[in-house]
Structure formats: C-alpha cells, structure tokens
Amino acid sequence: MIGIDASLANAFRRILIAEVPTMAIEKVLMVNNTSVVADEVLAHRLGLIPLNADPRLFEYLSENDAPNERNTIVYKLDVSCKKGSPRVTVKSDQLKWLPHGSELQMDSHDISAKAKSYTSFSCIQDSLPEFSKKPLGVKFDDIIIAKLGPGQAIELEAHAVKGIGKIHAKWSPVATAWYRMLPEVSLLKEVTGDDAEKLVKKCPVNVFDIEDLGNAGGKKAVVANPRACTLCRECIRGVNEELVELKRVKDHFIFTVESTGALSPEELFIEAVKILEDKCDRVISELS
C-alpha cells in the first residue's frame, strides 16, 4: 500500500483481524463424551477448526432468531474405539455436514407436544443453489480433535454461526495480518574489490550482490534486493558505517495476510476495504 498514513494501514490490519466475519462452531450439543478431553476443551477445539463456508452467503444469528438454513451450519461427530482395538485418532474430516439441520430433539415437559429439533430449517441446505455444488465441510481434513482409547467414544452435534474476531478469536479470518514499511537501502560510496565481497557476505538475507565492471576489471557491490532487508543493521556494523545508509519509506507498507482458509487473502482485503468504507459513511452521516 503506497501513499497512505500509518494510521490507515493499521486500521486495515485491525479490521482484518477483528471485523471481517467468518463461520465458526459456536454451540456444541454433547451426547456422549468418554474421552480424556473435557467437554469444554473439546468444544473449544471444534470452534477453532476453519470451515469451508463463505460467510458472505450467511446471515448473523441474533438472540431472537431461530437457527435456520441461512444462519446456521450443523455438523455431526460420532466416533468410537472398540475394546481391544488400538487407539483411534479423531480428525476434522470426521465432522459430517447435516444439510437437513439438527437431528437431536429438544427436551419438552409437555408429553403430548410434537418433538422439536434444535434448528428450524425450511429447506435442505444442499438444495440451495449456492451450496449444491460446494458442500459445507471443513477446510483442512487432518486437524486432530482428540485421541480415543479402547472403550471410549465421542458423539456430538456442532452448530456453526457467523461472527467476528472482536467477539472471539475463532471468528478471526486470519492467522496473522501485519505490515512493515518498505526498507530503503543505498550505498553512499562505491564499494569495490574485497570490501564488496565482505559486504555481500555480511547480509543474512542477500540484499547486496556483486556486479562485474566489465573491461575495466574488478567488481563492485550493488543493492540487488532492498525489499528483503529486515533492517537488522548487520551490514553497517564495523567498517561499513559510512558506506551504507538504511531508511524506511514512511508511506509505503508491505502487508502480509495469512488466511485461515475460508476466504483468500485477496478477498479478505476487499472485504476489509468495504468495512472501512461503511465506517466512513457512518461517521459522515452522523456528522451531517
């Protein structure tokens, strides 16, 4: 990002971490858990599994809303280890999507009343055009959830909803989002011969390179890859202090966005721009 203030760059970083929504498991209905992993820890681990679901296709679930096909994704996990069998590793690929909604029935004090499930789906989720070609599974199949010994079992139902990282880290769409200013490396004097060789060897990230002087013979050091510079200052220690100058370009930011998987880094940044635009519109309308 070039030509902006550091405060704006930091605003994008904070929005990427805390305000771009994703889908994550929020409610876990525990039917049976005889593993060594406590119910609360198991629910927490499930919440941190990245889901292969585009949050832009879902609505937020408020306290007054009923869980339906537009705001909730239901998963089922039913794994056991028979007595006398070797240990079983429970992985994320064993979470099965239930497009019909919840299969568990709510407790009712009225015996004559019709049994209700924990969701109110008006249609099957995979019948909707946006979900028919892309099942709502997990992003990575090899995440270890728990390990079961002989005679142990886990049976549960997990409900995923839309949320933001500001509420809980499990909804954060990025593993990390950070930026650094573009390094500016310049040679104040021409560095030739053995001094050039020493300068090139000093840099741990290969910012400098050797250039042959052609017919004149000999060689000189040049700045080949200034973007790679981490400003470790190793190149200016000792005899090179008067040869090399290190600076940061104050309005040029190099962003690193590491997505958890639901959306690509490019899509996440576009969503962050939209959120910042909405914030600006809100401020303008309030002031006017």
Image: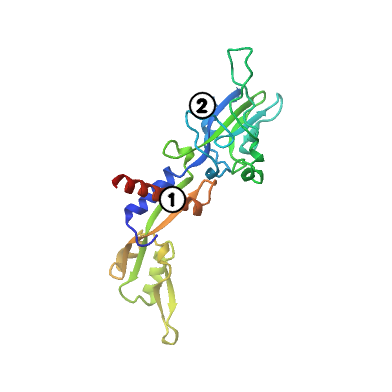
Query: Residue 268, percent across and down?
Result: 48, 50
* Type of the residue with mark 1: Lys
Image quadrant holding the N terminus, namely bottom left
Image position of 138 with respect to 146: above or below: below
Q: Could you tell me residue 207's position as x and y percent?
A: 41, 66
Depth check: 61 or 192 in front?
Answer: 61
Measure the C-alpha gap from mark 2 to mark 1: 35 Å
Q: Residue at x 68, y 27 (%)?
A: 81
As drawn, is 8 to the left or to the right of 153? Answer: left
What number is the disc on residue 122? none
Sequence order check, earlier mark of 2 and 1: 2
Q: Nearer the viewer, residue 170 or 99?
A: 99
Q: Nearer the viewer, mark 2 or mark 1?
A: 1
Disc 1 element = helix
Quarter-of-image position of residue 221: bottom left
One can see residue 36 in this view:
no
Please determine whether, in this image, residue 271 is positioned above or below residue 206. above
Asked where in the image residue 179 lies, by quadrant, the reply is bottom left
Residue farthest to the front, as pictured:
288
Query: At x 67% / y 25%, what residue is drawn?
Result: 150
Residue under numbered circle 2:
40
- Identify residue type, mark 2: Glu
**Image coords of residue 232 (percent x, y):** 36, 58
Name the foreground residue: 285 vs 48.
285
At 57% from the left edge and 33% from the top edge, which residue is drawn? Answer: 68
Q: Determine contact: label 2, label 1, CB under 8 Å.
A: no
Question: Which image quadrant for residue 143?
Answer: top right
Instruction: Name the residue beneath numbered marker 1.
Output: 274
Percent of width and height locating residue 99: 65, 35
Characterize the local packing of mark 2: few (<14), some (14-19) or many (20 or more) Cα atoms within 10 angstroms: few
